[in-house]
Amino acid sequence: MRSSRPAFRVLALVVALAGSHAPAKAQADGGSAVAMTHIELTLDLDYDQGSLAGTASYELSNLSAAPVAEVPFNLGRLMTVRSAHGPSGEALAFTQDVLVFGDSPKRQVNHVVVTLSRPLAAGEVIRLELGYGGYLVGYTETGSIYIKDKVAPDFSILREDAFAWPSLGTLSGRANRTAPRPDFTYTARITVPDAQTVASGGRLVERTTREGRTTFTYESVAPVPFLNLPIAPYALLSDQGVRVYFFPEDSVGARRVLRSATRGLELLGRWFGPLGTTPDLAVMEIPEVWGSQASLTAGIIQTADAFRDPGRMIALYHELSHLWNAPDTDQPSARWNEGLAMFLSERMAAELDGRDRLAENVARSASRLLSLAGDNPVLAEVPFLRYGQAGATDLSYRVGFLMFYALFETLGADRFDAALGGYYQDHRERGGTFPEVLERIQSESPRDLSRFFDTWVRTTGWLDELRAGTPVERIGR
Ligand SMILES: [Zn+2]
C-alpha cells in the first residue's frame, strides 16, 4: 500500500496494503511484474469539457525474475491513449480495450497493453511515455462511493483511484493490490484556469500564468506511496513547514488545522527532543465523502468535515508523529512505527484537544484483533517482528498500537519518552532496526523487559493472553 493507515479512508473504505509477496511473472498470478519508480505528468485540464489531455512518462523497473515484453496499464474508461514511446523516442505498439475487472465486474477501464521494442530484462529499468486524454469520471458504481472524480470548477482531483492517468496493472483488483509497489518519485505539471490552485504534498517548483491559464509544477521531496493532486479555488496558509490548502469558506477551520499542527509539533518536540530538520507537510482540504488519505511525503487529503469539527485531528497527529521516526533499516520492515503513530496520535488528541479516547480505542482494537484472529492465521502464527517478511504490515497498526500502549503503561510517560526520544536522537541520521529500538527501550527501563518483548514482538503470546482475558496493559508483565 499505500503506507497510509487503513483507518484514514472515511466510510471504512479499506485502502489496499501492498504485500511484499515475491514478485511473479504477469501471467503467473495475474499481477504486473513491472513496478513504477517515477512518474511525470504533464496535463492540461479543460473545464468546459470536463476533460484532460497530456502525457504520462514513467520509469519502470522489472521486479520479476523473467524478461517482460508487455506492460499493462489501466486508464479511466472514457479516456484513450493516443501514443506510446520508448526510451529513445521510438513509437511503441499498443492495444486498448474497454474491459471490466475479473474480480470487480463494475470496474470498467480502458485496458492498455504496450509492447516494448525489446523485452525488459529482470532488474532492468526503462522509461516510456504515453500520450492520452479524455473525460475524467468517477467510479461510484463500483461501491467506492468516494471516487466522484471529475473536472469541475468547485473541486477536482487527479488520483489513481479514478485512473486519471494510465496506472500499471492488470484486470484483477486482487493481483494489483498484492503486486510489489515501491514508493515512487514524481513531477506533476498541471495547467488549469487561473482561478484554480493545484495542491500537492510535493514542493512547488514553478508557477507560471499565460493567457488566463496557470501551470503548477510540483516535485516530490521524497518517494511517495501514492499521489493525490486536488484542485480548487484554494486559499493557502503556512507556518513552520506545514502548508494548509483550504476552501475559502473554511478559513476558520484551516487556521485551527494549522494551529493543531504547530501545537502538535511543539508537543512532540517536548516529548522526544528537537526534530533537527524543518518539516514539510501539506494538508489539503477536499469535500466531504471524497475519501481522506494521509502520508507524510505524499501529504494529507482531508475531508471538509475535519476542517469544520475541532475534534478531528487524529490523522494529522498520526502523520506529525512520523516526523520523529528515525529511518527504518529493517528489510523488509515490520513497520512498528505505524503502531507507535497510532498510540501517539491518541495521546496527542488527549493532551491537545482534551479528547481522551485511549481506553475506548484500546478496547476496540483488542476486540477487533480477537475477531480477526478467527480467520487470519497470520495473527496467531507470525510474531510482530516478522510482519514485514509475512507481508502483514497492515496488522502493525493495531498490534503495535496495543503494544506501545502497554509499554507506556509499564514504563510511565517519562521513561517512555526518554527511550523513544533517545532512540530518535541517536538514530535519526544512521537509522535503526526494530531490535535496536527494543534495546534502547530496555536501557531506559529499571525492570527487565524480556518477557514483555517476547510476548509482544518475538512470539504471538500477546494473542493468547488477550484471549485469556488479560487486560492489554497487563499483557507481557
Ligand atoms: Zn502512519
Image (tube, rainbow, N blue to C red):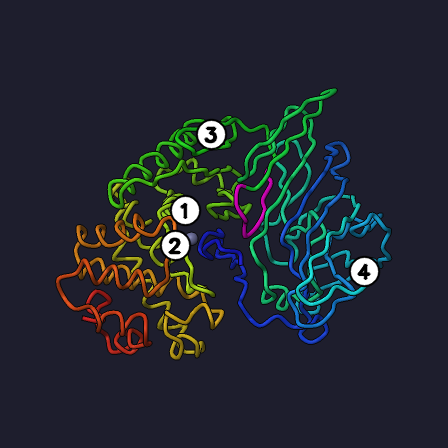
Percent coordinates x, y for residue 152 in the rendering: 67, 35
Quickly name the residue at label 2.
431
As measured in the structure, the alpha-carbon distance from the residue carrying label 1 to the one carrying label 3 is 22 Å
Quickly name the residue at label 1.
319
Q: From the image, state whether disc 4 or disc 2 is nearer to you.
A: 2
Going from the N terminus, do you reach mark 2 or mark 3 first?
Answer: 3
Percent coordinates x, y for residue 183 in the rendering: 56, 54
Q: Residue furthest top?
A: 211
Q: Circle 2: is it few (<14), some (14-19), or many (20+) Cα within 10 Å?
A: some
Where residue 366 sits, quadrant-wise, is bottom left
Look at the numbered disc 3 and give the secondary structure of its residue: helix
Query: With respect to residue 449, does 345 lie above or below?
Result: above
Percent coordinates x, y for residue 465 in the rendering: 25, 76
Q: Circle 3: is it few (<14), some (14-19), or many (20+) Cα within 10 Å?
A: some
Quickly name the residue at label 3.
250
Is residue 228 a member of the stretch shown in magenta? yes
Which span of residues is magenta-colored?
Answer: 221-230
Amino acid type at image mark 2: Gly
Q: From the image, state whether disc 3 or disc 4 is nearer to you.
A: 4
Quickly name the residue at label 4.
116
